[in-house]
Amino acid sequence: MNQQANYICSVKVTIIAAIGANNELGKDNKLLWHLPNDLKRFKQITTGHCIIMGRKTFDSLGKALPNRTTIVITRNKAIAVENVLCVESLKQAFVAARKLKEEHCFIIGGAQIYRQSIHDADELDITHVHESFEADVFFPAIDQNKFTEMNRENFQKDEKHIYNYSISTYKNNDKKVAAIFLDRDGVLNKEIGGYITNTDALEINEAIAPFLKKKQSEGYKLIVITNQGAIDKGELTHETLKEINNKLKDAFAKLGVTFNEIYYCPHHNEISMCLCRKPKSLLLEKAIARFNININKSIMIGDHERDRYCAEGAGVFGVIIPSNEVGNLY
């Protein structure tokens, strides 16, 4: 069974907004203008895709917009609306969209969600209304060093549009990269049912190498995230773990695969409290920051639910495979 197409899924993120001359968005949870043609265009380009918004924006709409997947970010777990998926964070929204196999998501507001998402957006679709308004919410400043205006279309006011406006598309210049995060035991090497505490116990899962070699040639970073609680329990030293990991790297190098980094947590939850042991996501987040990784084009492959929870905590799509059954990836 070849499930590669399902595993390597990604989503394009577009922020779409209409803003005044001073980045005004609205007041009292209402729009500041009425531009019928711009509203028609919004409907046209978002129909058939996923729209992500905060609760206040959803409240201003009053209902789910037809023919679109609607994801609302809210901490109110009591909200239950037909045809609306509620999540608690922007990261959860991105992961939810990928689970639904959405290929293009539009962030439609409000101001707080725009601020949170602008760093992850592939592009901005901005209607500039050429007038100043009294407002209580504002769009974040568009960093001209980060976003390049690719095109602009100007529209003059008429009997239905009392303001001049223009529509601009901005491309994100930030060269973020995609990554494949990998659990170690059960994915890269054989799961033996206990700790691997010496190099002799390490047996490579060679069947995953063609898949990793191909993805690396496509520009993916390969980053290992592994729990090594045996260190906390005194059954393994940092020095021996380094020898084991070096054997792993050398074996895969002979198969044409190079890992960009191996991150490990030395703690065990029976002994130490930490933020780096999976299912917590600190190590993943460190790697994302260090390598400038695009979370919406990256995945994590593991053989345990804690790997998926770790991935989703950082906003990355998690893939769970049966332990040692890595051949299905290619």
Image (cartoon, helix red, strand yellow):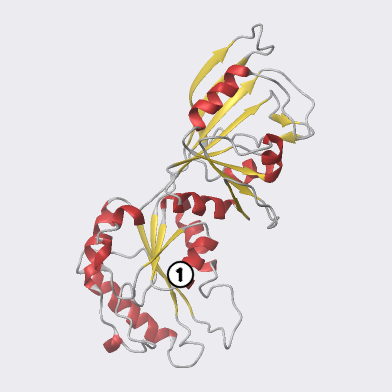
Position of 248 with respect to 35 (left or right) is left
Image location of residue 58, percent across then percent down: 67, 40
Disc 1 target residue: 307
* One can see residue 294 in this view: no
Q: Nearer the viewer, residue 231 or 42?
A: 42
Point 57% across, 12% down: residue: 155
The quadrant of the picture occupied by the N terminus is: bottom left
The quadrant of the picture occupied by the C terminus is: bottom left
Point 54% across, 73% down: residue: 276
Image location of residue 318, percent across then percent down: 44, 62
Q: Nearer the viewer, residue 104 or 101?
A: 101
How many numbered marks have been drawn onto this rendered protein structure? Answer: 1
Mark 1 surroundings within 10 Å by alpha-carbon count, few (fewer than 14), some (14 through 19), many (20 or more): many
Image location of residue 134, percent across then percent down: 80, 26
Q: Residue furthest bottom?
A: 234
Q: Nearer the viewer, residue 137 or 3?
A: 3
Q: Residue furthest front?
A: 82
Position of 155 with respect to 214 (left or right) is right
Query: Which residue type does callout 1 highlight?
Result: Asp
* One can see residue 139 in this view: yes
Point 53% across, 67% down: residue: 281
Image location of residue 48, percent across then percent down: 46, 35
SS label for mark 1: helix
Q: State the image quarter where residue 203 is shown.
A: bottom left
Q: Does 213 sit above or below residue 25?
A: below
